[in-house]
Each structure stands twice: as C-alpha cells, then as structure tokens.
Image: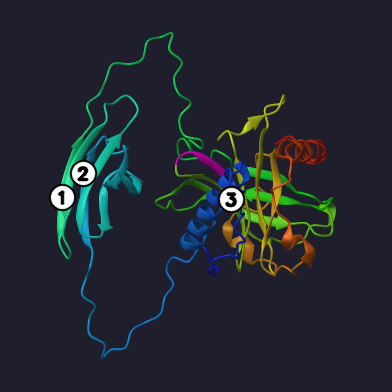
Amino acid sequence: MQRTSPPPRPPHAPHHPKPTRTSKATHLGVRLLAIVLMLSLAACSGGGGGTDANDPAPVPTTGTLRIAVEPASAELTIDQDGTLVTRRTGGGDVKLEPGTYTVTGRADGHEDASRQAVVNANSTTQVSLTLNAVDDAPDDEVPDDGPTNPNPGPGLAYGGEWVWVVVFAGTELTYEGFLSISERVEDTDRLTNNEAGAWRWCTLGLDRCPGPTGIGMFSTFDRSDFVASFIDEDMVKMIGIEEDGRLEVDEDGYPTFIGLGSWYFYAGGEALVAVGLARISDQPVFSSLDATEVEPFTRFPEPAELTLQTSEDADPEALRATVRERLEALQQRYRHED
C-alpha cells in the first residue's frame, strides 16, 4: 500500500466469550484483529533499519517456491499438512520454510488442479499447474456473483465520494465524515482489490469538516469478507465487515455498506461499532492519496470510558438498524447528481 508514514500496529482488547459457547461477536473480533494486523503490515512496507557492516551475512533459512499457472488469473492456495499457509492470485515466487507443500489452483470455468512440491532452504523449487477448461454452465443455472469487490477493468469499482457514520454499542455516541475513493493500492496476500482515498473525520459537524484525517479503504479480506477501514498517520482507527460480503444498492441505484466492526482508541482499547457508508457522488472531493498531506488533523478527544465497552450484551440487528437510519438521512442530505 502507498503510505506516507507507517502506522504501528493498533492496540486491541480481545473479547472473552463464555466458556460454554463461542459468541458470534468473538468470531467477528478474531477476524477484525487479523485484518488490523494485515493493514498495519501492509502500511509498514518499506521500513526497517540497517545492519552493521562488520556483522556476518545472515544464513537464509527459507527457500523459494516458483509457481507457474495457466490461466494466469487462477487463485492459488498453498498448504502444508492440510493447514493453509498462504494464498495468492497468479504465479510467482513465494518464500517458504523448508518442507513439503501442496499448491492448488482454482479459476472460474476450469477444473481445480493440485501439485506437491518440496522446498529446501536457500534454493528454488519450480512447480507448474495447468487448469483444464470445462463446459459452460447450462443457461438455466445461476452463476456465482464472483468476488466481493470485482474491480473490473481499468477503472475503480467504488470510486467517488462517500458519507460515513459510526454508531457505538451501548452509548448514544456517533462519529461522521466523508471518504474520497480515488485510486487502487497494491494487494497483499490477504487484502486484495484495494481501493483507497482521503478519509475525513468531521468532529465539528459535516458542514464544518476539516481536511483529510488519513486514508480510507475498501478491501476484500481472504477473498470472502468485504471490508471498510480508516487509517490515520499513526494507526488503524476503524475496521468494519459487511457480513454478507456485498454492497447493498438503494432504490436510486446508490451503493451502501452496512456492517459491524471495531473503533480503536488513541489511548488504547477498542469498542464495538456499527458502520455505514453510502456513495453520494461519482466524483471524489480529493482526487489523490497525496491529499492526506494537505492539512494536519487535530485529534478529537475520545471519551476514555468507551475503551471498556464490550460486545457481549450488544444487539447487532439494533445497531445495524440505527446506523442504517442515520445513513439514509445523511445520504439524502448530501447526495448530488454528477
């Protein structure tokens, strides 16, 4: 991802489900934590310190698996003893610990194919997969809708100006702002189809909104969850997951995002939130990620007591309904025709 200054990993406060059952909120928390870590790692790419010239060169402990696959757009998974190690789109080089791995390729309209490969330290192992084409589905069969964020063609799937609202569980507190989706950013192993732009947090009201707070982004996580995230210059601030993996479309054809997630506090800790985003224009107000450097953001003091909020007694459906109602009002107020 293109970032001007790398954020550290944000703090987190894992949820603790009752011993007799695993709560749905706990599953959400685990997925959110994984996404936070991936966002932090992606934003931190390119950093790191040097080594002393007198230090001996490190001995490589990994090997390289060089994969060639046809078709080139195939989705690949690499596992070891039945445990997923990584996944990627298309062939290329993958650094792995020594061992035996199974590479499996999948692509629409093709049969799956798998190959085993042994990776040794400080060496390169090559493996090739060819996925055979299959007959097209019958006319009466409904095809799968495809990835959660298809990102077709050279343009943006979700480019434009969005209004957003976050509602906190167990309180009457809400935050609001805008998001300008203006460009694609580089994929990682688990975050793909990334589209990003300047994120604004309107602490003084939407009509008195300051310059950009940082970067906001739509992503697909592990090719299943559709994710919205906000990142300022220091940390990941918000992660929201659209549970059904798809944007909704209102009666006027405008896409909306309604999901649950976590808000991460500057002072530490997190709170369960419902998050909603609605596109109000096809043209983003800020046309580049560089806009995030235009005006420094003055941090808004967040209530310290919210750091102790948990999701055990929250009603997810009530949260979604609240954020949906607020979002519809904001959408009608700020939407304009292009």
Q: Does residue 40 appear in this view? A: yes
Q: Residue furthest front?
A: 20
Which residue is farthest bottom?
Answer: 54
* Circle number at residue 68: 2
Q: How is the image coloured?
A: rainbow
In the displayed structure, does residue 142 sit left or right of residue 274?
left
In the image, taking residue 189 as reference, residue 252 lies left or right, namely right
Q: Amino acid at mark 3?
A: Gly
Looking at marks 1 and 2 on the same chain, the residue that comes earlier in the sequence is marked by 2
Residue under circle 1?
126
Structural distance between the alpha carbons of marks 1 and 2: 8 Å
The secondary element bearing badge 2 is classed as strand
Figure check: 114 above or below 233 = above
Q: Secondary structure at mark 3?
A: helix
Give the magenta-colored segment's residue range.
223-227
Q: Where in the figure is residue 136, as x and y percent of width and height?
A: 33, 16
Image marks 1 and 2: residues in contact by CB distance under 8 Å: yes
Q: Amino acid at mark 2?
A: Ala
Q: How many residues crowd around disc 1 within 10 Å: few (fewer than 14), some, or many (20 or more)?
A: some
Q: Quadrant of residue 303?
A: bottom right
Across and down, in percent, residue 35 comes to 52, 53
Quick check: 249 above or below 308? above
Residue 225, percent from left and from top = 52, 41
| Residue at mark 3 to residue at mark 1: CA–CA distance | 38 Å
As drawn, is 126 to the left or to the right of 165? left
Q: Which badge, 3 or 2, comes first in the chain's sequence?
A: 3
Q: Name the quadrant containing residue 269.
A: bottom right
Most foreground residue, 272 or 248:
272
User: Residue at image x 26%, y 34%?
Assistant: 71
**For mark 3, what is the residue?**
29
Q: In the figure, 142 relative to 35: above or below?
A: above
Reply yes or no: does residue 225 show up in magenta: yes
